Structures are given as structure tokens and as C-alpha cells.
Image (spheres, rainbow, N blue to C red):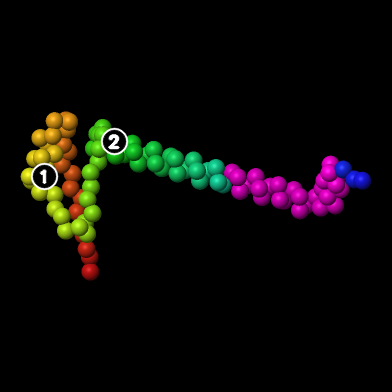
Amino acid sequence: MKTVQGLALRLFRANRFIISSSIFSIALAVMLILSMILFSFNAQDSLKEELRKTYGDMDLSVGFNIDQDKEISNPLINQIINNRDVEELSKVSITHVNVD
């Protein structure tokens, strides 16, 4: 009866190139996946920092769907400003442009 360790050593001796290239490929894949995960975390942190630098510290960001045919009007803005929990309102307007 052969041991698993003996079987692994015989496999390694018979196919050194295949085994070492497989180990190298797995290590390379793990490093690439880790770098992609770290890149996404860094991109998310950079986006949050850029928003904080542009608009300051905020607790809430509000938007609306352009396809709903609803508009942000002055009475709505006044209602938001007059809410006792709102300390400050930043007027930021991002419009959608259609180009033919």
C-alpha cells in the first residue's frame, strides 16, 4: 500500500515542469484577484473622498429618476430646508443632456 506523500513525491518527480507551472499559475491568479479587490476598495475610497472634497460632509444625498416626469421644484426645496433636522442644503444640479 502506497502513502499519499509517496504518491505526491513520485508525481512531482515525474512532472516537475507541470507541477511547478501549475503552482506558479495558481499563485499568479491569487495575486491578480487580490490586486483587483484592493483596486476596487481603493477606487471606492477615492470616490468617497472626492465627493467629500467637492460637496463637504453630508449625511444624505438625494436624487430622482429622470424617467418619472417629476421635477424638483422650489416648494419641494423649501420643504426640505424647513425640515428641522436639515442643517444645510447644498444646491447641486446635474442635468441630463441628449445629443443626436
| Mark 1, secondary structure of its residue | helix
**Residue 51 appears in the picture as rendered:** yes
56 relative position to 20: left or right = left
Circle 2 is placed at which residue position? 52
Crowd band around label 2 with a 10 angstrom C-alpha radius: few (<14), some (14–19), many (20+)? few
Seen at 49% across and 40% down, the residue is 38
81 relative position to 48: left or right = left
Between discs 1 and 2, the one toward the N terminus: 2
Q: Is residue 66 magenta?
A: no
Residue sitting at the far bottom: 100
Above or below residue 24? Residue 83 is above
The C terminus is located in which quarter? bottom left
Q: Magenta residues?
A: 4-31
Above or below residue 35? Residue 82 is above
Identify the mark at residue 76; answer none if there is no mark: 1
Three-letter amino acid code of the residue under disc 1: Leu
Q: Is residue 30 magenta?
A: yes
Identify the mark at residue 38; answer none if there is no mark: none
| Mark 2, secondary structure of its residue | helix
69 relative position to 36: left or right = left
Seen at 62% across and 47% down, the residue is 28
Q: Position of residue 64 (x, y in %)?
A: 22, 50
